[in-house]
Amino acid sequence: MQTFVRKAVVAIALAAGVSSVSVFAQSQDPSTYMHVHAPFAQSLVMKVKAAHDADLVKLGLHATPPGETDNVIIANITAAKVGKKSSAADMEKLAKQQPIAVRLDKDKTFDLLIPITDAKGRDLSGGFLVMEVPYTKAASEEEAIKIGLAVRDDMQRQIPSKEALYK
């Protein structure tokens, strides 16, 4: 029953323009979730995913929201993930400050982590994109990263500033 209710709320949130997806984080464990309100980031993730739908399975944007210390998912095509704290493994990958692709043979996708800035190259407080590119679109990690960089570049061009993500 709880799964049904959650799916219904997701559908309503999507129909309402996805501006209040952070409601999911409020009902989650505070050790792994926090409240996030980033409507511009959410609409941008949805827009960019739609533009690159044929090349991507998943898309999410991580950053540290203003006044917070934890890096979290601030926008995601799966609304229930918004507010989830970034994993230690993702933070280790981000520290390398370079795109990383990992083969996920069971899902037949490449799991990507790509650092992102705003349109002027300014930091988004630990900003990075996560996405999955299916094997049908990329035969190697290098090809998956090329797709991921195109997605990142598209999104990055549309981010005027870190502050804009939360408006």
Image: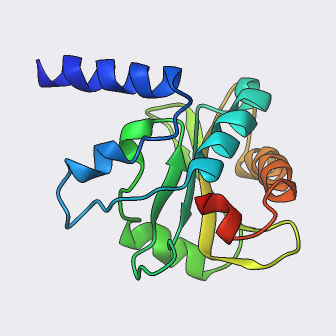
The residue drawn where x is 46% and y is 36% is: 78
**Residue drawn at the location 62% of the way across and 69% of the way down:** 127
The answer to whether residue 100 is seen in the rendering is no
Residue 104, position in %: x, y? 50, 42
Please tell me in which quadrant of the rendered image residue 69 appears.
bottom left
Identify the residue at the far left of this view: 1
**x and y percentages locating residue 143 in the rendered image:** 80, 45
- Res 128 → quadrant: bottom right
> If the image is split into quadrants, where does the C terminus sit?
bottom right
Q: Position of residue 11 (x, y in %)?
A: 41, 19
Q: Is residue 142 above or below residue 107?
A: below
* Above or below, 2 relative to 67: above
**Residue drawn at (52%, 44%) of the image:** 76
Q: Is residue 149 above or below residue 110?
A: below
For the point 65% across and 60% down, which residue is it? 165
**Is 69 on the left-hand or right-hand side of 121?**
left
Residue 118 visible in this rendered orientation of the protein? yes
The foreground one among 52 and 119 is: 119
